[in-house]
């Protein structure tokens, strides 16, 4: 759904660098969900945030990954010291009964 | 924890024919939602159809319909009069209510649908 905006669409990082992925939810929504899609897999939930609060991070790896949704601006998913296994498509969604997804960011770690 | 299983990694159908994609799930909850999403090569996740568990009537959206069997925990998608534009990955998803009212989705691994002209 064009209402959920993600950028960049493609991101290439060298091993050890940081990756920052951005998401703005649909107009009127104040929450976002982040999902990760590994090659040949379905999407897996990572984290659910409302403005200035992390509500559910049960799917987030314990190290190197963090997420925030500040009062102003987009939600940011940050991956520190990226490794090849972080290469995936990362999707953001906002939901009111039905989840609407952004177009995703494809992260490639070289 | 809820799980979703799609047992058909790939399916193919002739244009104008009908195809059914399978999905089973496991849950101890009595009230939930089920969804089918389509992911074309553009990677965009597109909602195809949704079903509320408390509704006995199967959902229908134009050429798309579901066969929801709650006792069997089965949720198959039927595509009638298949079109070339239906070719995509199809994901079955379960909506779990998590911490703090989180409406997170649990996805299956997907079925790749090919439509042959």
Image (tube, rainbow, N blue to C red):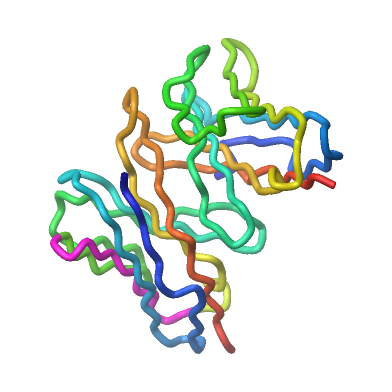
Residue A7 in the image: state x and y as whole percent: 72, 35
Residue drawn at (56%, 79%) of the image = B114
Residue B81 is at least partly visible in this image: yes
Residue B102 vs residue B112: left or right? left
Q: Quadrant of the N terminus of chain A?
A: top right
- Name, please, the residue furthest toward the front: A63
Residue B48 is at least partly visible in this image: no
Residue drawn at (30%, 64%) of the image = B24
Residue drawn at (50%, 46%) of the image = A44
**Of A27 and A31, which appears nearest the observer?**
A31
Picture layout, residue A48 above or below residue B105: above
Residue B105 vs residue B42: left or right? left
Q: Is residue B79 magenta?
A: yes
Picture layout, residue B93 above or below residue B99: below
Q: Is residue B45 magenta?
A: no
Residue A97 in the image: state x and y as whole percent: 34, 38
Residue B64 in the image: state x and y as whole percent: 36, 68
Residue drawn at (15%, 53%) of the image = B55
Quarter assignment of residue A69: top right
Numbered disc total? 0
Specify start and end residues of the magenta stretch as a single range.
B71-82
Picture layout, residue A2 above or below residue B49: above
């Amino acid at each position: 759904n064009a209402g959920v905006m993600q950028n960049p669409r493609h991101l290439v990082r060298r091993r050890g660098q940081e990756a920052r992925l951005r998401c703005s939810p649909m107009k009127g929504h104040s929450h976002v969900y982040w999902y990760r899609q590994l090659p040949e897999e379905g999407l897996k939930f990572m984290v659910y945030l409302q403005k200035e609060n992390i509500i559910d991070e049960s799917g987030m790896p314990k190290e190197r990954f963090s997420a925030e949704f500040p009062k102003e601006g987009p939600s940011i998913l940050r991956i520190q010291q990226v490794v090849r296994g972080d290469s995936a498509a990362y999707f953001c969604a906002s939901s009111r009964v039905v989840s609407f997804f952004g177009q995703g960011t494809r992260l490639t770690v070289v | 924890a809820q799980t979703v299983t799609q047992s058909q990694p790939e399916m193919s159908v002739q244009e104008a024919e009908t195809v059914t994609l399978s999905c089973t799930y496991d849950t101890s909850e009595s009230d939930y939602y089920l969804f089918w999403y389509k992911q074309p090569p553009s990677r965009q996740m597109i909602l195809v159809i949704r079903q509320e568990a408390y509704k006995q009537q199967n959902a229908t959206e134009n050429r798309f319909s579901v066969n929801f069997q709650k006792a069997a925990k089965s949720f198959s998608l039927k595509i009638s009069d298949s079109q070339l534009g239906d070719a995509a990955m199809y994901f079955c998803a379960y909506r779990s209510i998590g911490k703090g009212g989180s409406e997170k989705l649990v996805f299956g691994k997907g079925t790749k649908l090919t439509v042959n002209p």
